[in-house]
Image (spheres, rainbow, N blue to C red):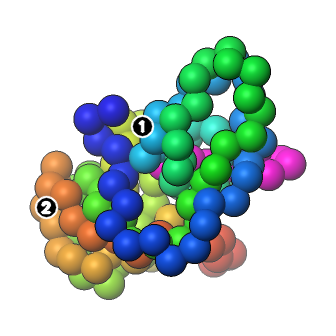
């Protein structure tokens, strides 16, 4: 994958999430989650965050568990302008990008540790959290 999130500092071990056997997931993919504790490649913006794939999952390999990081420092790719300290969301319409959440962000993937412009890589602290702003 050209836009994979790259682990820079590991501060915990990956957690096993359920994945579909027929799905292929590349190492470093930003993942959203569905019930029950299932990791999927996101198809929409602001999806509930599972984390980042710690390993590759080959489609139809018989495996239904995948290690997923829920914390750590990663080098990721910006969609739009990002300022250090911004809360970030997964851009489900772009290939493995993150973007600034703005005022109404609810499913935070992490916090920007550097300022970045569109298409630039930068450091992000992976810190999935959901905030109900309504």
Question: Magenta part of the protein: which range?
Answer: 30-38
Residue 60 lies, in percent from the top left, at 68, 15
Q: Which residue is mark 1?
A: 93
Residue closer to the observer: 4 or 111: 4
Q: Nearer the viewer, residue 36 or 11?
A: 11
The residues tagged by marks 2 and 1 sit, at their Cα atoms, a distance apart of: 18 Å
- Name the image quarter holding the N terminus: top left
Marked residue nearer the N-terminal end (2 or 1): 1
Relative image position of residue 48 (x, y in whole percent): 64, 56
- Assign the C terminus to one quadrant of the image: bottom right
Q: Nearer the viewer, residue 39 or 133?
A: 39
Give me the residue at 64% from left, 23% from top. Answer: 23
User: Which numbered dot is residue 117?
Assistant: 2
- Magenta stretch: dominant secondary structure: strand
Who's the residue at 32% across and 84% down the image? 85
Residue 102, disc: none
Q: Quadrant of residue 121?
A: bottom left
Residue 40, quarter of the rendered image: top right
């Amino acid at each position: 994958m050209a836009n994979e999130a790259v682990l820079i500092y590991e501060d915990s071990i990956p957690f096993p999430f359920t994945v579909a056997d027929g799905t292929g997931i590349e190492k470093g993919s930003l993942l959203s989650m569905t019930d029950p504790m299932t990791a999927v490649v996101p198809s929409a913006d602001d999806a509930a965050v599972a984390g980042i794939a710690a390993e590759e999952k080959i489609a139809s390999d018989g495996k239904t568990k995948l290690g997923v990081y829920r914390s750590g420092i990663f080098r990721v790719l910006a969609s739009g302008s990002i300022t250090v300290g911004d809360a970030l969301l997964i851009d489900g319409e772009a290939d493995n990008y993150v973007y600034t959440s703005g005022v109404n962000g609810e499913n935070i993937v992490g916090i920007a540790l550097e300022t970045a412009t569109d298409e630039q890589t930068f450091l992000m602290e992976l810190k999935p959290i959901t905030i109900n702003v309504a």
